[in-house]
Image: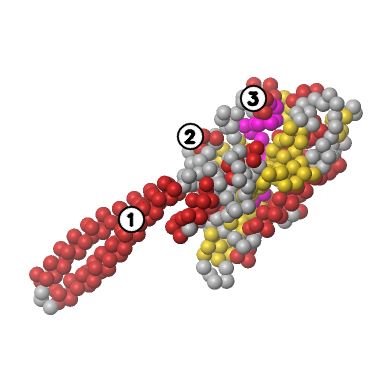
């Protein structure tokens, strides 16, 4: 969440920047500032009272020694009265702080100045394109190819669990495993340390990365134990650094993780959710960085280059979009999406989002670092899909269909052990 210091010292800038996300912050910011004034006034009065209590308490003993019993009793009575007042002030201060925190949780992150203006996905800016779009005749969509080559059974998934939980079989399962291993090997080669985290998290972890309370309805909730199935490895991996003070010399920290991801995708329907296009459970490799404010933008560039190298090596037509303010997530300060082209569906499929959250998540996580001056300050957090598998698999199957079968990109052959699915 935004820091109180930023809001109170740069009020007009905060309101202006949040307007780019189509969030009218005037009322809530005014409320935060008003509550902070109340909190500060209560704190000041409390400090004065505590100082007076301390002085009077010390005087009681001295008065008793001097035989001034009545004055000592009067001092004791005043101390008791002041303590009652201090309790009221403490409660008022804590109430104000709770209200401030509750409001801060409803305010999104401020977008960077270079984030494009816009209200929806149509306003996102294409910044780069790569690889040729294949020209195919009578191309089959991946759900038909999956059935033809017995790679994925969507009906069996419905039987076992429900829609959006496919069963991968034979070479379909091997292709999944090949992609996972390929992505992990590429991440390790790029300097990322592999993590194998839990796939269920507690409320504190969901809050720390901003999934709670903002996206609570999109997460699967295990009510008996009050745990949540993760929508992305970003949640458990970033929370490794919750309530931690890091050493500046250890930054940037670079982690990667393969996990299953679970998303309710409430309200999703229509042709765009068919097959692998939108699932409730899927495999994904995530890259996460914890960095200093001075270096985080360079880290973001390096992460973008890493994801681009993956789609390039898979020989998939791709484009990179800089998301406009209206299409960005609640927590991101800037975000770039990667899309690959589906020749059979004739459309672009999102396969990765690479985001810099500035210190927004770190403030919720209390993730800090100390430099040479030994002063603790908030880190910057970043993450990106590298990559999510379902739409990658869809594009690989659709774009590489030939009379001989489905061709496997050269980079993947050492992992699959076969050059064609036939």
- The residue identified by callout 1 is 38
Mark 3 → mark 2, Cα distance in angstroms: 30 Å
Mark 3 vs 2, N-terminal side: 2
Using a 10 Å C-alpha cutoff, classify the residue at mark 3 as few (fewer than 14 neighbours), some (14 to 19) or many (20 or more). few
Give the camera-side residue of 227 and 333.
333
Q: Secondary structure at mark 3?
A: loop
Q: Is residue 207 visible?
A: no
Residue 287 lies in the magenta-colored region: yes
Give the camera-side residue of 128 and 92.
128
Residue 59 lies in quadrant: bottom left
Mark 1 vs 2, N-terminal side: 1
The mark found on residue 270 in the picture is 3
Mark 3 vs 1, N-terminal side: 1
Give the camera-side residue of 98 and 132.
132
Residue 130 position (above or below residue 150): below
The mark found on residue 223 in the picture is 2
Q: Point out residue 208 in the picture as x, y percentages from the top left corner.
A: 52, 48
Between marks 3 and 2 in the image, the one whose residue lies nearer the viewer = 3
Q: Which residues are magenta?
A: 274-288
Q: Is residue 354 visible?
A: yes
Q: Are the residues flagged by discs 3 and 2 in contact, CB closer than 8 Å?
A: no
Mark 3 → mark 1, Cα distance in angstroms: 51 Å
């Amino acid at each position: 969440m935004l820091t109180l210091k930023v809001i109170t010292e740069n009020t007009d800038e905060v309101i202006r920047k949040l307007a780019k996300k189509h969030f009218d912050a005037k009322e809530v910011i005014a409320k935060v500032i008003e509550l902070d004034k109340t909190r500060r006034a209560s704190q000041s009065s409390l400090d004065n009272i505590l100082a007076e209590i301390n002085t009077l308490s010390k005087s009681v003993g001295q008065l008793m020694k001097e035989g001034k019993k009545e004055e000592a009793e009067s001092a004791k009575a005043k101390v008791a009265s002041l303590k009652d007042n201090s309790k009221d002030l403490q409660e008022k201060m804590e109430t104000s702080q709770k209200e401030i925190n509750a409001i801060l949780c409803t305010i999104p992150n401020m977008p960077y100045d270079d984030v494009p203006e816009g209200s929806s996905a149509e306003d996102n800016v294409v910044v780069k394109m790569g690889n040729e779009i294949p020209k195919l005749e009578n191309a089959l969509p991946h759900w038909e190819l999956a059935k033809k080559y017995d790679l994925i059974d969507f009906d069996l998934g419905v039987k076992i669990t429900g829609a959006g939980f496919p069963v991968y079989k034979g070479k379909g399962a091997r292709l999944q495993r090949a992609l996972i291993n390929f992505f992990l090997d590429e991440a390790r080669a790029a300097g990322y340390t592999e993590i194998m985290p839990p796939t269920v998290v507690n409320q504190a972890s969901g809050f720390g990365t901003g999934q709670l309370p903002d996206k609570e309805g999109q997460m699967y909730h295990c009510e008996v134990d009050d745990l949540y199935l993760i929508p992305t490895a970003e949640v458990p991996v970033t929370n490794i650094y919750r309530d931690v003070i890091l050493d500046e010399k250890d930054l940037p920290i670079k982690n990667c993780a393969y996990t299953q991801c679970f998303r309710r995708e409430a309200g999703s329907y229509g042709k765009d959710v068919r097959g692998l296009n939108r699932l409730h459970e899927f495999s994904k490799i995530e890259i996460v960085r914890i960095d200093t404010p001075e270096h985080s933008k360079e880290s973001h560039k390096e992460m973008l280059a890493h994801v681009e190298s993956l789609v390039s090596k898979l020989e998939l037509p791709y484009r990179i979009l800089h998301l406009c303010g209206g299409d960005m997530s609640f927590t991101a300060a800037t975000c770039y999406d990667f899309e690959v082209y589906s020749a059979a569906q004739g459309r672009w499929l999102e396969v990765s989002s690479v985001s810099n959250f500035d210190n927004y998540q770190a403030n919720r996580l209390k993730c800090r670092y100390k430099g040479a001056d030994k002063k603790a300050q908030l880190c910057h957090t970043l993450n990106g899909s590298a990559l999510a598998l379902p739409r990658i698999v869809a594009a690989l199957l659709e774009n590489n269909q030939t009379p001989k079968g489905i061709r496997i990109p050269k980079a993947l052959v050492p992992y699959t052990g076969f050059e064609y699915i036939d």
